[in-house]
Amino acid sequence: MPNQRIDVLHPADMSPTDLQLWSALRARTAPVANPFMSPEFCQTVGRVRPGARVAVVRQDGEPAGFFPFERGRWGRGRAIGLGVSDCQGAVLHPDVHVDPHQLLRASSLSVWEFNHLESGQDLFLPFATGRFASPVIDLSGGYTHYENLLRTRSRTFLKSTRAQDRRLGRRVGPLRFVFDERDPAALRTLVAWKSAQYRRTGRRDRFAQNWINNLVSILANTDTPDCSGLLSVLYAGDRPVAAHFGLRSRTVLSYWFPAYDRGFAQFSPGLVLHLRTIEAAAAAGIEMLDLGRGDAAYKDSLKTGELTVHEGALLRRSPGAALHWFSREPARAVRRFVRERPQLRTAAVHILEAVGKTRDRRP
């Protein structure tokens, strides 16, 4: 019987050996090198979220697993970076067996909530209450191969986007695309566009939260093999018209915050940006572009397949778990009910847009 111990650390207190083993374990056990599951992402969240912690599972004295999380009041825990993280779970040696409730007890958690749990996380999948498609683009065959697939599946989309690319260049100014833009002003412009988009569509403005602003700013200057910030910008003349900020590893680009200048909406600059980003990503050795959970027409047009992510919560008997259930589960059930009925989902989108217009009219 192996001797197992669980130590809980702040991400900044992890040793270089622990960090190296985390990266090595992840590379060995994960089919997809998603940057949100890297130790670098966890450590960055630890710089902006005081409740960030990592439970290190040690077996016979050796690190054998890593469980990143955030701890709040009443022991209510959540996935690291919940709200912006597009891939969640634990990084465990395949021969290590952990009792999930013991993991919560050792972490002083009454509940652990997730909304982008990746498939293959067998420790937590029994506690999932919903599953969702996360569209992806397979670029392992190179861009030419992808474009041929796109021409077969979405010929009209490809043709019209190429036409808009040429039209934008003629009407506004010569187009220039920068795959890895380092100008901080360009990032500020993107954040302003995205913040306005959230408000316009009636959604919660993520960039109204300081920790998300700080997280993105730090990641924009992060450059490691497993997690690097990547800002891509489309310019017409000298003016930025569309941009995207995401995270990349050696082989995966996670699409995160795309937006464009509404003044040029007639030219579909966002779609032009998507195609140029995909082409540049393939040239840079990216094998998969993860478009992320959520419905969008452009995702349906661009995707070649889908991953599955899950939401739910692991709870143990405690006042904090009961408080979590009463505060979250009724609303979660309502969202599931709406999502499963297209007419209600469409109506909900219209309501959000109406709320956004009301916000814009306020002084």
Image: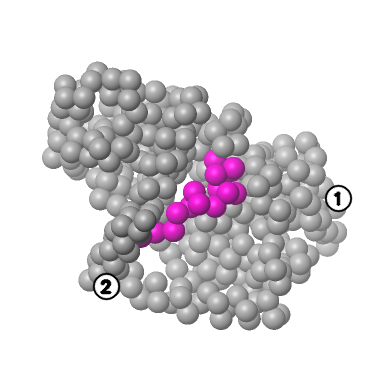
Quarter of the rendering containing residue 334: bottom left
Q: Is residue 230 above or below residue 94?
A: above
* Apparent side of residue 3 relative to residue 66 in the rendered image (left or right): right
Residue 175: give x, y in percent of width and height.
27, 21
Queried whether the magenta region covers residue 152, the answer comes back as no
Residue 110: give x, y in percent of width and height.
69, 72
Quarter of the rendering containing residue 140: top left
Queried whether the magenta region covers residue 211, the answer comes back as yes
* Apparent side of residue 179 relative to residue 319 in the rendered image (left or right): left
Near-viewer residue (137 or 113): 113
Q: Specify start and end residues of the magenta stretch as a single range.
A: 201-216
- Residue at 54%, 40% in the rendered image: 216
Label 1 environment density (alpha carbons within 10 Å; few <14, some 14–19, many ≥20): few
Near-viewer residue (294 or 252): 294
Residue 146: give x, y in percent of width and height.
29, 33
Residue position marked by numbered label 1 in the rendering? 61
* Apparent side of residue 354 relative to residue 124 in the rendered image (left or right): left
Residue position marked by numbered label 2 in the rendering? 344
- Residue at 16%, 24% in the rendered image: 171
Q: Amino acid at mark 2?
A: Leu
- Residue at 29%, 67% in the rendered image: 351
Could you tell me which secondary element the residue under label 1 belongs to?
loop
